Image (tube, rainbow, N blue to C red):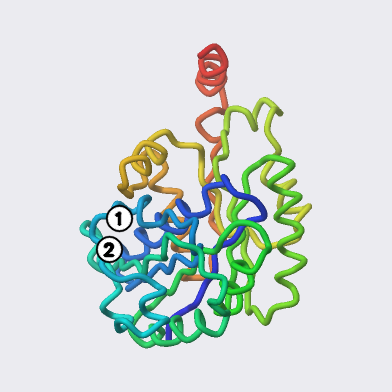
Amino acid sequence: MARKIVFTSGKGGVGKTTVCANLGATLSNLGFKVVILDVDIGLNNLDVVMGIENRVVFDLIDVIEGRCRTSQALVQDKNFENLFVLPSAHSYREEISANDIKNVVDSLENSFDYIFIDCPAGVEQGFKRAVSSANEAVVVVTPHISSIRDADKVLSILSSYNLNEKYLVVNRVRGDLMMNGEMIDVDEIIKFLHIPILGVIPEDDDITALSSIGALGGGASNRAWVLLAENLHNGTRKVYDCTQKYRGLWGTLRRNIKRRM
């Protein structure tokens, strides 16, 4: 039976879809079979992030409305053989219900180890459709006040759902700014949100560049993705230290150089 995990955030622009896609790729690289559902109907971009937009034949709406089987709508990633995507539709469909999404998710649970549900940002109808199908939730935030406050609101709503676990991923962390006291510390975010930390992902130009051309990969932060995947699967809490290379004499020099750039 697959673990059904929804990826959500209080606001857009925090890298939720990128975290979902790269974590799925890392788990598939470790030998697990992963499928990612894009349930952001009308505003979907998972197919673009994963570089499969030109290979989509059927989508989530086609499955729900019976025009194809679920397996026919799945798109296999070219670089990760255990990674599949069920793309969403580009036109908004208000009549799609939470039960429709749940039926699709349930049809996949015997074929995969992990089912990731990429949830729309915010807490509107699309959020409710996505969360209702999951047993676990990953809340993605960045070290910014607006993101943290919105995540807090999302967590209060998630408490009304029957979820086994809720986890936190802090994305786009800059170790140099954190060391300089110019970015909110990860421990402060954990303390404020009262949720177990699953992982920390550093700000990485490689991730941004790869995402912009529809490719996945860890870049300089590959170790952070591996730790995140291992934590999710094994229940461990080995958090990537974004500040390590900015400590000591050489670290201070790096921070000063980055400040001047």
Task: Where is residue 246? Give x, y as percent.
Answer: 54, 28
Q: Is residue 107 left or right of residue 257?
A: left
Residue 56 is labelled as: 2
Q: Which residue is drawn at 46% across and 57% down?
A: 44
Task: Where is residue 121? Give x, y as percent.
Answer: 60, 56
Q: Are marks 1 and 2 in contact (CB under 8 Å)?
A: yes
Q: Of the residues shown, which amino acid type is indicated by label 2?
A: Val
SS at mark 1? helix
Q: Is residue 62 left or right of residue 130?
A: left
Q: Quadrant of the N terminus?
A: bottom left
Q: In this view, does 186 lie to the left or right of 241?
A: right
Front residue of 259/210: it is 210
Q: In this view, does 139 lie to the left or right of 216?
A: right
Q: Which residue is drawn at 66% across and 62% down?
A: 196
Q: Which residue is drawn at 32% across and 73% down?
A: 33
Front residue of 67/71: it is 67
Residue at which label 1 appears: 53
Task: Where is residue 78? Give x, y as percent.
Answer: 21, 58
Seen in the picture, residue 99 relative to 194 is either above or below; the reply is below
Front residue of 4/230: it is 4
Q: Of the residues shown, which amino acid type is indicated by label 1?
A: Glu
Seen in the picture, residue 74 relative to 77 is either above or below; the reply is below
Few, some or many C-alpha atoms within 10 Å of disc 2 (few <14, some 14-19, many ≥20)?
some
SS at mark 2? loop
Task: Where is residue 18? Give x, y as percent.
Answer: 45, 51
Seen in the picture, residue 223 relative to 8 is either above or below; the reply is above
Which image quadrant is residue 236 in?
Answer: bottom right
Mark pair 1, 2: CA separation? 6 Å
